[in-house]
């Protein structure tokens, strides 16, 4: 039978011809559907609480833009700016965030970078609410409060660091993963893999998440989508690894894993118990663990045994030496290592917010009262010079009152306490235990919950506790808690339509 021509209408089963779909008409229908949805007063009433919180989150972010212009700086910020102008892999941080900044360079303003980061923060709230649409609306709304209204989340978005971008990429991947109707479509699975690859190239802690998401598909009996996800995620990661190898002749995405793990073990490492060989003994600290400085000081302080070695800290020889020392410390003192990890992890769930790891780092997470001083260290000064090229003018942070004062007052009272985060992590476990009928396959909440646990445990195990490392896990924990609510709770709440279910079919999100 002759094939129909491309411009000829296709035949239907009854012999009639069906005209091909016109993409422009479909776009018009989508636009009309969206306008009708926005004009419907009942839609606004159904979602008024979430929309109110979203609007309040937008106002708080506008205050940050007005009170601290154009951005807040962190020591890592200058390294990212250098990579924008010198495109090459960094030994400590992957280049994903620098590429993000590179995309925004034509605007010549760090205010644009922070504005986009604030929009990403708002988008995370929308993703959580949309993904948790099967839970009662009050539960879905409550799950968005930490990311939309937490003052430290807003401050993090205003810092020139990679965490907000990383947080958005991981939450977006989790949201797509638990969308039942689309999670097995090859294009959607590939999108999940690409999001995880981008997250990994933004912060290397994203590497275990690739395995975790693929394992979830396998547990649900979807081996082929798991393979698609792995291919989509690993191709960009391996390509970046090839770039890193071509630059440094070293395998990996960064060249500092051994150094950071060495610093981590110095909170308990006892050379009397380890009995290291002579080449490792130079890294010992004779002080007892309780009198030692925080772990990060063993990476950056001038009197660190590692820093005192010849050459830069992150050479292959130094990193390998530090990695061997760390491995020996962990294998020689496994219980001390476990106790140290639990101690660091426990800082996540304290009610207060004690100063840690030191006043300088702690201060970067507060909206400042005075304008920060220019950087003093030479590498940061190099980055500051490149930052002037990026901004095409002077850099710094201008504090404008009364907006800045309002934010500082807000930050003193509006934050998520550690026990509340612990409670969010326990909700899915309690729901699973109390559920009468066991699910035949892993529940949807397992993906964001596992990702949150990985993001909390990994820094405590491989680096050091930092308040900044906690925040990316918060929206995932809240999403998992909302997803774990039983369907009968939804019926008891009296609401049978959720955010997105009342959108016309031709404009489904």
Image: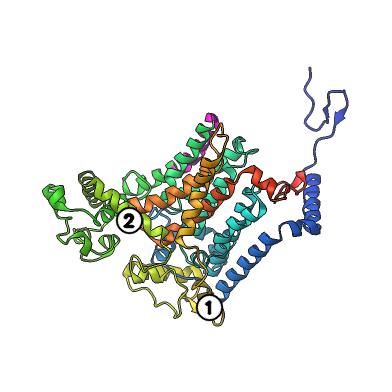
Residue 404 image label: 1
Residue at image location 62% in from the left, 53% down from the top: 140
- The span from disc 1 to disc 2 (Cα, nearest Å) is 35 Å
The front one of 387 and 423 is 423
How is the model colour-coded? rainbow
Residue beneath disc 2: 343
Which percent across, then down, holds residue 48? 71, 61
Question: Which quarter of the figure has residue 386?
Answer: bottom left
The front one of 314 and 415 is 415
Residue at image location 55% in from the left, 78% down from the top: 406
Locate residue 178 relative to residue 94 in the image: left or right.
right
Which percent across, then down, holds residue 404? 53, 78
Please identify the dominant SS of the magenta region.
helix
Question: Which quarter of the figure has residue 443?
Answer: top right
Span highlighted in magenta in the image: 221-237
Which percent across, then down, holds residue 283? 18, 55
């Amino acid at each position: 039978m002759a094939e129909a021509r491309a411009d000829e209408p296709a035949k239907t089963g009854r012999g009639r011809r069906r005209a091909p779909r016109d993409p422009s008409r479909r776009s018009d229908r989508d636009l009309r559907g969206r306008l009708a949805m926005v004009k419907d007063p009942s839609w606004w009433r159904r979602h008024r609480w979430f929309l109110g919180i979203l609007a309040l989150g937008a106002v708080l972010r506008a205050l940050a833009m007005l009170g601290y212009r154009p951005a807040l700086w962190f020591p890592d910020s200058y390294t990212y700016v250098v990579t924008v102008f010198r495109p090459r892999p960094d030994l400590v941080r992957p280049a994903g965030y620098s590429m993000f900044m590179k995309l925004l360079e034509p605007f010549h303003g760090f205010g644009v970078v922070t504005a986009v980061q604030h929009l990403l923060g708002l988008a995370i709230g929308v993703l959580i609410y949309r993904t948790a649409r099967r839970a009662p609306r009050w539960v879905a709304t409550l799950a968005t409060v930490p990311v939309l209204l937490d003052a430290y989340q807003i401050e993090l978005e205003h810092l020139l660091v990679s965490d907000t971008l990383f947080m958005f990429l991981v939450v977006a991947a989790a949201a797509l993963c638990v969308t039942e109707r689309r999670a097995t479509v090859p294009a959607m699975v590939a999108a999940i893999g690409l999001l995880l690859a981008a997250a990994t190239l933004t912060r290397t802690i994203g590497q275990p998440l690739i395995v975790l998401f693929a394992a979830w598909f396998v547990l649900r009996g979807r081996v082929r989508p798991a393979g698609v996800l792995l291919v989509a995620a690993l191709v960009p990661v391996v390509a970046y690894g090839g770039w890193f190898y071509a630059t440094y002749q070293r395998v990996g995405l960064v060249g500092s894993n051994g150094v950071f793990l060495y610093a981590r073990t110095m909170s308990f490492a006892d050379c009397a118990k380890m009995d290291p060989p002579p080449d490792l003994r130079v890294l010992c600290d004779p002080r007892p663990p309780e009198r030692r400085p925080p772990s990060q000081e063993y990476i950056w302080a001038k009197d660190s045994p590692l820093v005192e070695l010849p050459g830069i800290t992150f050479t292959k020889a130094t990193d390998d030496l530090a990695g061997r020392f760390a491995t020996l410390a962990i294998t020689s003192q496994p219980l001390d290592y476990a106790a140290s990890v639990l101690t660091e992890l426990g800082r996540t769930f304290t009610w207060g917010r004690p100063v840690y790891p030191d006043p300088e780092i702690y201060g970067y997470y507060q909206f400042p009262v005075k304008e920060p001083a220019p950087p003093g260290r030479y590498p940061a000064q190099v980055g500051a010079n490149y930052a002037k090229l990026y901004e095409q003018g002077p850099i710094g942070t201008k504090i404008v009152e009364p907006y800045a004062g309002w934010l500082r007052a807000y930050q003193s009272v509006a934050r998520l306490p550690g026990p509340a985060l612990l409670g969010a992590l326990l909700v899915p476990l309690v729901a699973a235990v109390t559920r009468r009928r066991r699910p035949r396959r892993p529940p949807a909440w397992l993906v964001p919950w596992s990702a949150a646990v990985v993001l909390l445990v990994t820094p405590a195990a491989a680096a050091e506790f930092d308040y900044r490392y906690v925040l990316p896990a918060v929206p995932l924990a809240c999403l998992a808690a909302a997803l774990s609510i039983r369907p009968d709770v939804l019926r008891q709440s009296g609401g049978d339509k959720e955010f997105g279910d009342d959108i016309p079919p031709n404009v489904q999100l």
